[in-house]
Image (cartoon, grey):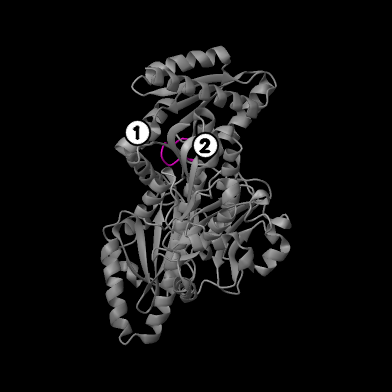
Amino acid sequence: MARYALIAEPDPHRAASLLTLVAGEGLEGVLARDGAEAQEVVRQRSAPALLLTDLALPRVDGFTLLSWLRERQDAGGTQVVVVTAFDELRVRAWQLKEALGIHSLLSRRAPTETVRDTVRRVLAGQRPLPATPTESGPDDEHQRLAHIDALHLVDDGPPEAELQELVTEVAQAFGVPVALLTLVLGDRQWFKAHVGLPHALARDRGTPRDWAFCHHVVMGRESLVVPDATRHPVFKDNPLVRDGIVGSYAGAPLVTPSGEVLGTLCVIDTRPLVLGTEDMAALRELARRVAGDLELRSRARTEARDWSRSRQEPSRSELAALTQVRDAIQALDVATLLVAPGRQPFAGNAALAELLGLSLEGIPKLSFDTFRQHVASLTADPTGHSPLLDLASDTSRGLHLSLTLEHPRPRRIRWVARPFAIPGGMAQLLTLSEPGGVSPRDERERMLRVDALTGLATRRTGEERLLREIGRCRRDGAPCGVLLVDLVGLGRLNLRHGFDAGDTALRDVARHLEPVGAPTGFAVRWEGGTLLVALPGLDAGATEALREHLLSELETFEVHTVAVAVEGEEDPGQMLARAHAALARVKAEHRARSTAG
């Protein structure tokens, strides 16, 4: 059996810690970021001496990975340690430990020393010591629920339009029918925003907590992906799965800046869901931002109510707060108007005065309606649209409008009003700017479709575009080639020099690949250290020639490359399978040469 430790762990920081741990036990550590990648490693290298795995892995979950491993004849001696954040998954795995060949199960919250001691004893064939309980207690849950109550997030009104827009965008980006923003309460999960639900669930805006996949996310404080719920030993008997509503699930916790978990941002499909680590990272980042925004908005409303009830000297405290903000906006290059509670302009900055042709000293003397009418007079239609130019409501996240100014010169302007609490009520900052930045919607779309590390398209986006390009080439009678480029030894590089070194190498290789095959070709962050280049219009010979040329450009990097082309009416999936098989052979031959040397 090969003397290496396979670590199936999507989180790079935890993976680095585990790589260091197994190196201390004299084992080579090999990292797989999901279950499918772990299977590929085993196919190439044979079964490992030690498998350290989570149970919630993208693409192929941990239960499926362990079942698959135990079917291999060379895996009889593989020692398995499971480390997971999800208590109920760990309990079910312990019930199946004999069938799955599990030697020890640990909580994600177990100290590093406990994990190290467990690995050491398992490798020595000794019985691991009982782990010290580290699960959160009832006091933690009471505190979490009290935090949700204090934020007043649950209400009887319809879902907020902006949150509905968010979940709609997430569903579209992931290509799934259902996306939810949930709050996990004492006995139920409540949908603060939702899209794609069956009528009964949409009407009730929730389910019992016992049915909720999101319950596991909240209690584990970790992202959970269930690629195929119909086959999962924990979820296959869930009522939502039996009724065909949930076939697969991926959810990220709504962790507020104060550290409490409110619920989840999740996506659901009726079919198996194949998500990579980049997809899950994007979902986690969106969930973090949404949680922070929910807490911030709620606190602002609460503070405004408290100030309005208890303030002793409203005019003095209100004036002090407005004066501080007035002084701050003077340094801004963006045209800004500070509006006091009661819709009264308090101050503007020089950029605003210049943009609108107003005197800086005269701005506080205007009423807001007069200010609004002045802006309308500068537009193409000054007579009918001034009522559209307004401030945000006190309970909203802000007001966004676009308008075209004709004077003093034609330009497109973005009108954004955002409320904020001060002693005395809700003041507002109104900014007028020429579009040029990135809108929140565009930023969310970019996060889901662009790999944050390399700037290339994510695998989800790349697959969609590759299928379209192959279909177009077939219609035009043109060939289509594909290059796979794999950075050799990325795991060793991360282990020896840290993840920053590996990230830098990947970015450098990506910069070389991005212009290859332009203008019709494009590059994709495929998985881990593997990048794909699609080459519409290039046949097998031209693709191979380009591969050889590319190797000379990448001579400062150690990379494996393969070139393939779509053959006739070959299914794109078969073509990609041929490419992966060819890459696996190249990597195996490289290892054989290295071992022989």
Q: Is residue 282 above or below residue 509?
A: below
Furthest residue to the front?
Answer: 126
Q: Which residue is mark 1?
A: 493
Measured Cα–Cα span from mark 2 to mark 1: 18 Å
Q: Which residues are magenta?
A: 450-456
Q: Are marks 2 and 1 in contact (CB under 8 Å)?
A: no
Q: Amino acid at mark 2?
A: Glu
Asked which quadrant contains residue 332, the reply is bottom left
- Tell me which numbered mark, 2 or 1, is placed earlier along the sequence: 2
Prevailing secondary structure of the magenta residues: loop
Q: Give the residue drawn at x 33%, y 39%.
A: 500
Counting labels gives: 2
Instruction: Please tell me which residue lies in front, 448 or 438.
Output: 448
| Quadrant of the drawing holding the C terminus | top left
> In this view of the protein, can residue 141 be seen by the observer?
yes
Mark 2 surroundings within 10 Å by alpha-carbon count, few (fewer than 14), some (14 through 19), many (20 or more): some
Q: Give the residue drawn at x 61%, y 62%.
A: 212
Magenta stretch contains residue 355: no
Mark 1 surroundings within 10 Å by alpha-carbon count, few (fewer than 14), some (14 through 19), many (20 or more): some
Q: Give the residue drawn at x 31%, y 62%.
A: 359
- Give the percent coordinates (x, y) of residue 519: 50, 24
Q: Which residue is mark 2?
A: 37
> In this view of the protein, can residue 437 be seen by the observer?
no
